[in-house]
Image: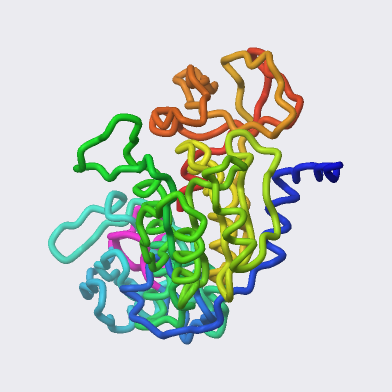
Amino acid sequence: MDAPRKPMLSVGEALAFMLDAVRPVADTETIPTLEANGRVLATAQVSGMNVPGADNTQMDGYAVRAADCVSGNASLTVSQRIPAGHVGQPLLPGTAARIFTGAMIPQGADAVVMQEQCELAGDVVTVKHAPKSGEWIRRAGEDINNGSVILPAGVRLRSQELGLAASVGLAELPVKRKLRVAVFFTGDELTMPGEPLAQGAIYNSNRFTLRALLENLGCEISDFGIVPDTLEATRSVLRESAQGHDLIITSGGVSVGEEDHIKPAVEAEGKLNMWQIAVKPGKPLAFGEVQQAFFIGLPGNPVSSFVTFLLFVRPFILRLQGVEGPIVPRAYSMRADFAWPKADKRNEFLRVRVNDNGGVELFRNQSSGVLTSTVWGDGVIDNPPGQTIAVGDLVRFIPFNELLY
């Protein structure tokens, strides 16, 4: 008598199980800040300066003493001109300094009057405004204080973080080394674009989708190509791909058919810790280890492979890279402009797009083989198990831009 089948893990349970197993990469390197986009910061960065470094003006105008302009129609001699990057002379009472955005406030001045509120005649400016002390002045350290942490360890560096690092003079940054990922694809029916398509064959779209997703995450990729549908060939490439890699990702062959060899191959060469999740699309997803490398086996259907990568592989990779901040994508409450009357026992991820009326509409065909739905759509609806959707219901919308990078 067969043993009772274990219940499938929920999406949350499966992701928690995978993340609990993570061993983040430890190796680091120091690289130019200009080359650090997408890398994970290894140690916190502290500013060695104030930003701004000195009081400066927020706009073009005239630096004045506020006490000289209380009448709202003061005439002052223009004593100097201060462009950005230059240091002016102390401002004498009864005078004004022509000043330009970003320039340091001269000693003695305590306000800036925008040029639109002034009239210049020769070397005399009429200030038609009574400024308050501090008006249009950016104070030293207003953005960053000397000695403050500007970037915590474990942050994935984007354009914003790189600009911030540069603003305090950091020419180099310590980062975690790149993750080394091996990929291969199983299926005798797979053919590469550019090759003749035999009867019964299909083009290997997953190779292109998964490689691009890994590139978006800054991984070093070793592509072992298409592997024949035999147990020995699968075992052989598993052994080879485990060498020198942190993670092995496969597509196809994770179901229970006679030509599906991933599960027995992983069990023979390593260990399989998780298999099958209550998710649609993408139930057959495998997680385990082969030698020192983690292993994730994705379904072969293109939408299933795409969705399970976004839901499970992406957060796993981010933690493996050393990212310490939030990795769960944000979901937004949106109005459903469609009906989904048939509930599924699994957690469904439906491809939708945002319409001009502020709601989301459903792609007409939610099959796991319809890759056009991922191009047409703006994201997915996270629909819980057993949940129907009526027109006007609020649903959990996860945009693709929360999932792709």
Q: Residue furthest front?
A: 1
Q: Residue furthest left?
A: 122
Question: Residue 160, how many percent across, how many down?
Answer: 42, 62
Magenta extent: 56-75
Total numbered circles: 0
Is residue 360 on the magenta stretch?
no
Residue at position x 55%, y 77% from top?
A: 25
Question: Residue 112, how many percent across, how many down?
Answer: 37, 63
Q: How is the image coloured?
A: rainbow
Residue at position x 68%, y 45% from top?
A: 276
In the picture provided, is 24 more to the left or to the right than 40? right
Q: Is residue 98 above or below residue 72?
A: below
Question: Residue 96, how many percent across, how many down?
Answer: 29, 69
Answer with the quarter of the image where residue 376 lies: top left
In the depicted view, which residue is nearer to us: 385 or 243? 243
Question: Residue 202, how many percent across, how many down?
Answer: 34, 35
In the picture provided, is 42 more to the left or to the right than 376? right
Q: Is residue 59 above or below residue 87?
A: above
Query: Taking the image as drawn, is residue 219 in sight?
Result: yes
In the picture provided, is 371 more to the left or to the right than 145? left
Residue at position x 55%, y 63% from top?
A: 318
Residue at position x 57%, y 29% from top?
A: 350
Query: Image quadrant for the N terminus?
Result: top right
Answer with the quarter of the image where residue 233 lies: bottom left
Q: Is residue 360 above or below residue 96?
A: above
In the depicted view, which residue is nearer to us: 33 or 321? 321
Query: Taking the image as drawn, is residue 66 in sight?
Result: no
In the depicted view, which residue is nearer to us: 101 or 368? 368
In the picture provided, is 362 more to the left or to the right than 172? right
Is residue 71 on the magenta stretch?
yes
